[in-house]
Image: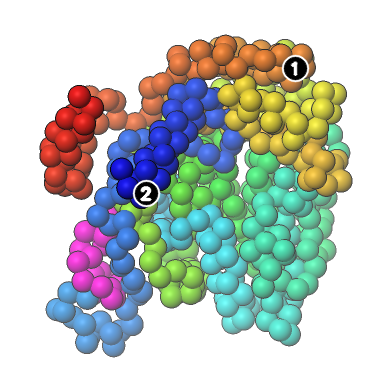
């Protein structure tokens, strides 16, 4: 065995060990993670992986010149050959994702939720540079004069902060949503509306990473529609809740958001990518904003938009459109049951008992009585329960967090129901409150949940997989025979 083979063999063994641990022994409760189906994973490594398909909307003159050359597909100019399949995939993805999120327009090329947000910020600045209205939109240096968002310390997204993706796009005031005095995980709607009417921020960004309750989008939209001369952009970062947008939680576009962004691998069980959606159709008075979003996507922010995961996202979206009603309903129901069970077993649950603690996939614990959040997260990991420590609204710094953030979406996909989360809550309480070691019990319990739900079953999947695998590895039979001889 040469040096390279030895090194890769050792790495391969570690990969397999990690796969078995995370996929078979652990309860994965990090709310920003999920496990894609086997078909989605195979799409990620299929031929489009590593290919290019740069394209943009063709101008009238370009359409005349390129007609009949094969470079023009629909209204898009493609700069690489061999892209017919990718064109079909991307168009189908936009249609299916639009159906899912109730949007007429979808930009599917961002490769992360943060990139999606940054694209929108760029587009908003360019749009406002030529916009209308009698309120300050941009400063003299062509940056946003004001932004309203969720404070990072109170669960806001990093990408919506001036030191995050907003870094180059705002130099005016940053107005944080006021918090409900009874529940710091909800926005004080009346005070928010007063602030908006007074400050008139040109960009208002809903969405959080610590997301327990709906955002007051419809109330804001009602105020905007009744105010002359004030036309802000209302953006909803749905990264954490993209997989549950709709009737069981919240439908941001129907509520009045102009733009919805998000990542596609949290509650939405696809590959790690980003998405932008809207109803800014060609006849919409703000259509220019959507044109700017397209242009800031390419050539503004992307070149290779990771075609393997693009294909994988199409498969995941088809899965979601098939199973979304039962999946979404079960996720929300599981989270409510899990939160209540944690409280019943003596843990301190955030979000307000009177509000049912949560209306999303997330459950947040306060660990102050038992120890620092970092310590509790490590203790849970040692017992095969994967969470992340979290600063809570009254914490001064993330260095000393007093919370644990958990989500139920991944384990819901592996078949857990409400009663199953009661057992898991008891195990968590035993670890956190009593500092008991229950790693073997947890691993044994996890073995009950090995079959993935809300996708094709094993038999249906196995009818599709062989053709994909054979096309990827034409010498597969040869490898199998060699492996068999080596093992014997």
Give coordinates of residue 40: x percent, y percent: 34, 41
Give the position of the N terminus as an image quadrant: top left
The answer, for residue 83, to whether it is visible in the render is yes
- Nearer to the camera, 225 or 103: 103
Give coordinates of residue 199: x percent, y percent: 80, 65
- Nearer to the camera, 353 or 159: 159
Give the residue drawn at x 25%, y 82%. Answer: 63
Residue 427 sits above or below residue 403 on the image: above
- Nearer to the camera, 375 or 458: 375
Which secondary structure, mark 1? loop
Give coordinates of residue 198: x percent, y percent: 82, 63
Residue 77 sits above or below residue 182 on the image: below
Residue position marked by numbered label 1 in the rendering: 435
Q: Is residue 394 left or right of residue 124?
A: right
Residue position marked by numbered label 2 in the rendering: 3
Q: Are marks 2 and 1 in contact (CB under 8 Å)?
A: no
């Amino acid at each position: 065995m040469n040096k390279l083979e030895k090194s890769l063999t050792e790495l391969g063994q570690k990969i397999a060990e990690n796969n078995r641990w995370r996929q078979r022994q652990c309860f994965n409760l990090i709310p920003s993670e999920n496990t894609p189906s086997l078909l989605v994973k195979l799409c990620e490594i299929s031929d489009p992986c590593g290919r290019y398909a740069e394209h943009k909307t063709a101008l009238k003159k370009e359409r005349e010149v390129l007609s009949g050359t094969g470079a023009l597909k629909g209204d898009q100019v493609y700069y690489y050959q061999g892209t017919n399949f990718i064109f079909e995939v991307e168009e189908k993805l936009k249609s299916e994702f639009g159906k899912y999120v109730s949007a007429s327009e979808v930009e599917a090329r961002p490769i992360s939720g943060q990139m999606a947000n940054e694209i929108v910020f760029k587009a908003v600045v360019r749009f406002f540079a030529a916009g209308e209205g009698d309120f300050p939109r941009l400063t003299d240096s062509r940056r946003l004069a004001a932004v309203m968002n969720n404070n990072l310390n109170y669960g806001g997204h990093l990408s919506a902060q001036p030191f995050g993706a907003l870094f180059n796009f705002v130099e005016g005031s940053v107005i944080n949503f006021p918090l409900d005095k009874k529940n710091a995980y909800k926005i004080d709607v009346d005070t928010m509306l007063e602030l908006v009417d007074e400050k008139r921020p040109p960009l208002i960004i809903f969405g959080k990473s610590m997301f327990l309750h709906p955002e007051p989008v419809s109330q804001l939209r009602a105020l905007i529609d009744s105010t002359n001369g004030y036309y802000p952009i209302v953006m909803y970062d749905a990264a954490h809740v993209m997989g549950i947008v709709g009737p069981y939680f919240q439908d941001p576009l129907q509520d009045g958001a102009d733009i919805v962004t998000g990542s596609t691998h949290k509650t939405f069980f696809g590959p790690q990518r980003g998405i932008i959606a809207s109803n800014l159709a060609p006849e919409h008075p703000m259509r220019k904003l959507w044109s700017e979003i397209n242009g800031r996507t390419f050539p503004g922010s992307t070149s290779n938009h990771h075609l393997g995961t693009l294909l994988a996202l199409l498969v995941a979206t088809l899965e979601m459109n098939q199973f979304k009603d039962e999946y979404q309903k079960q996720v929300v129901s599981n989270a409510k049951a899990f939160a209540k069970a944690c409280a019943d077993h003596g843990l301190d649950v955030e979000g307000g008992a009177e509000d049912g603690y949560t209306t999303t996939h997330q459950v947040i614990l306060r660990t102050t009585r038992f120890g620092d959040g970092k310590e509790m997260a490590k203790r849970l990991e040692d017992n095969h329960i994967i969470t992340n420590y979290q600063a809570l609204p009254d914490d001064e710094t993330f260095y000393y967090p007093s919370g644990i953030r958990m989500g139920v979406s991944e384990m819901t996909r592996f078949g857990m129901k409400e009663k199953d989360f009661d057992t898991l809550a008891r195990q968590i309480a035993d670890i956190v409150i009593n500092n008991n070691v229950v790693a073997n019990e947890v691993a044994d319990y996890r073995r009950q949940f090995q079959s993935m739900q809300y996708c094709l079953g094993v038999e249906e999947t196995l009818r599709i997989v062989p053709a994909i695998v054979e096309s990827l590895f034409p010498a597969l039979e040869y490898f199998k025979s060699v492996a068999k001889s080596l093992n014997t």
